[in-house]
Image: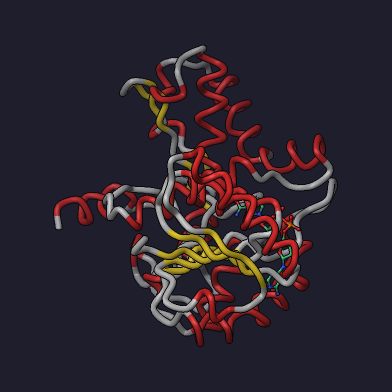
Amino acid sequence: MNRKVAVVGGAGNVGATVAHAIAAKELADVVIIDIAEQKAAGMALDMYEACPIEKSDARVIGGGDWAEASGADIVVITSGKPRKPGMSRDDLVRDNFAIMESIAPNLVKHCPNAIVIPVANPLDAMAQALLKLSKFPRERIIGMAGVLDSARMRTFIAMELNVSVENVHAFVLGGHGDTMVPLPRYSTVAGIPITELLSKDQIEAISKRTANGGAEITKLVGTSAWYAPGSAATEMVEAILKDKKKILPCSVYLQGEYGKAFTRTVMGATWASAEKKMPKNYFNELKKYLLK
Ligand SMILES: NC(=O)c1ccc[n+]([C@@H]2O[C@H](COP(=O)([O-])OP(=O)(O)OC[C@H]3O[C@@H](n4cnc5c(N)ncnc54)[C@H](O)[C@@H]3O)[C@@H](O)[C@H]2O)c1
């Protein structure tokens, strides 16, 4: 195929889910990079062997050699320790920052023009770390979390109202953690805001369950989720490769948007959450984008 996506950490749970989904949907050739080289090679071969059944001509290879990733259009970064029950995402910051430091030189050397989708947690911090370490322009570091958090909220709304998930739109901004901001007024079922369909208590419960969505799975499974995170990253890959002009909540570095001046340590999404409310200029910013 004429598109290539590298998945770093692709022998792990989230990475393998992303890699398989990209190949099954025939979005691009896939290169799995992992320090577990042999496992990466084996899982890639297994995915490749699924492609005839999926009717996909994507090629999938895996191993530890970054040279195979060279020229990738997109690099998804799932290399990082996952949470165990009781841990917060922030507990991972030290270990996962060290992993970002170890991969950044390879990223810059082999994939200098790639769009990067950080996934490792704590997501907003790791996205910012990769921005600094790679020195890539901010437009090319787009963290995945908002798509997942919004999908979780959509699921809970659909469960509550017993409607198709396809009829439900939800928007969750803010950081990927305690500062997450579910936006009920902008979450709709067939165009109707959920504030007109559900009671305050129901909305409160949905928002709370959304914010704790990761912890809920971690408690049940013993490690963090991978199916929904994998699907979320894949949606971003597809939107980018097909240039779908899709509007997705992502973690990006702000420079003055939402009326906020550039600050050194604040990722856009995180800032939006700092006040625990709707970013002041959300509508204006979106309108500006839509009308440009
Ligand atoms: N952003 C989100 O919404 C979201 C959702 C779920 C999980 N996560 C995060 O994604 C990360 C991965 O989770 P998982 O469940 O797949 O974990 P996992 O342990 O199953 O997989 C991690 C993989 O990374 C590999 N790895 C470690 N260091 C590496 C390096 N230097 N180079 C290449 N590969 C390396 C490991 O060998 C392993 O295969 C975790 O940090 C988790 O918290 C984020």
Q: Is residue 130 above or below residue 135?
A: above
- At horizontal 56% and vertical 18% (from top left) the residue drawn is 159
Q: Position of residue 209 (x, y in %)?
A: 65, 32
Residue at the left extreme, as displayed: 291
Q: Quadrant of residue 227?
A: top right
Residue situated in front as seen by the camera: 95 or 275: 95
Q: Is residue 271 visible?
A: no
Q: Quadrant of ligand 1?
A: bottom right
- At horizontal 74% and vertical 47% (from top left) the residue drawn is 224
Residue situated in front as seen by the camera: 279 or 112: 112
Q: Is residue 291 above or below residue 95?
A: above
Residue situated in front as seen by the camera: 109 or 69: 69
Q: How is the image coloured?
A: secondary structure
Q: Is residue 46 above or below residue 32?
A: above
Q: Is residue 51 left or right of residue 85?
A: left
Q: Position of residue 99 (x, y in %)?
A: 70, 75
Q: Is residue 220 above or below residue 31?
A: above
Q: Quadrant of residue 219?
A: top right
Q: Quadrant of residue 215?
A: top right
Q: Position of residue 226 (x, y in %)?
A: 66, 45
Q: Position of residue 73 (x, y in %)?
A: 40, 68
Q: Is residue 77 left or right of residue 137?
A: right
Quadrant in the picture for the C terminus: bottom left
Quadrant in the picture for the N terminus: bottom left
Q: Is residue 213 visible?
A: yes
Number of on-image labels: 0
- At horizontal 58% and vertical 86% (from top left) the residue drawn is 105
